[in-house]
Amino acid sequence: MNYWLVKSEPDAYSWTQFLKEGKTAWTGVRNFQARNHLRAMKRGDAVLFYHSVSEQQMVGVARVEREHYPDPASGPSERKGDWSCVDLTAEKTLARPVTLESIKADPLLRQMALVKQSRLSVTPLTKAQFQWILQLAGTKTK
DNA sequence: GCCAACGTTGGC
DNA sequence: GCCAACGTTGGC
């Protein structure tokens, strides 16, 4: 079981909308490193959902429902299969969102790729980091 | 709103 | 193949 973090600007695609839909195809990733992370995701992996820019906090937990498959090409220079996407299901909302501020203040959490490589939209995190975040959020793991 | 970090593009 | 210019992302 692996642990991941995906980011979204709330204005573009919010956790609220995700919850409403229950399931979403995580498409549109156009960065090789992020794509490789998508391809490494396994069904059942836990995924933290982070709101960037206007909120800068972790808001929910999702799960990998379907492992990577070709992201529909969006431009003339893209061939089908150049990029990948996965399907995610929304699992639970964090009782208390975990802010970037508190992440940076924490010795364990500030080692996350989210902090070090702020522009990367799909990043891995350790089990310890994941569980600690849930604890800070006042949310129980299954 | 600004700008640092980073990725991509295109001229040479 | 190098690198300057440019665009985008996201923190501040």
Image: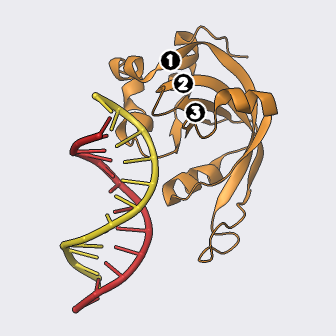
Chain colours: A orange, B red, C yellow
Which callout, 3 or 1, points to the residue nearer the camera? 3
User: Upstream in the sequence, badge 2 or badge 3?
Assistant: 3
**The image quarter in which residue A81 lies:** bottom right
Can marks 1 and 2 be said to lie on one chain? yes
Q: Position of residue B5 (x, y in %)?
A: 29, 48
Which chain does the residue under circle 1 lie in? Answer: A
Q: Which of the numbered marks, if any, corresponds to residue A58?
A: 2
Q: Quadrant of the C terminus of chain A?
A: top right
| Above or below for A15 versus A131 | below
> Where residue A135 sits: x, y (%)?
56, 11
Label 1 or label 2, whichever comes before in sequence order:
2
Residue at image position (47%, 29%) is: A54
Instruction: Name the residue carrying label 3.
Output: A10
A10 versus A69 height, above or below: above
> Which SS class for mark 2?
strand
Q: Earlier in the sequence, mark 3 or mark 1?
A: 3
Q: What x and y, as percent, mark residue A53?
A: 45, 34
**Quarter of the image where the N terminus of chain A is located:** top right
Q: Distance between the Cα atoms at labels 3 and 1?
A: 15 Å
Would you say A75 lies left or right of A112 here? right
* Residue assigned mark 1: A98
Say few, some or many: other residues with alpha carbon within 10 Å of mark 1 (under 14 / 14 to 19 / 20 or more): many
- What kind of residue is marked 3? Pro
Q: Residue at x 76, y 41 (%)?
A: A24
The secondary element bearing badge 3 is classed as loop
- Find out whether the residues at labels 1 and 2 contact each other: C-beta distance under 8 Å: yes
In the picture, the disc for residue A90 is none
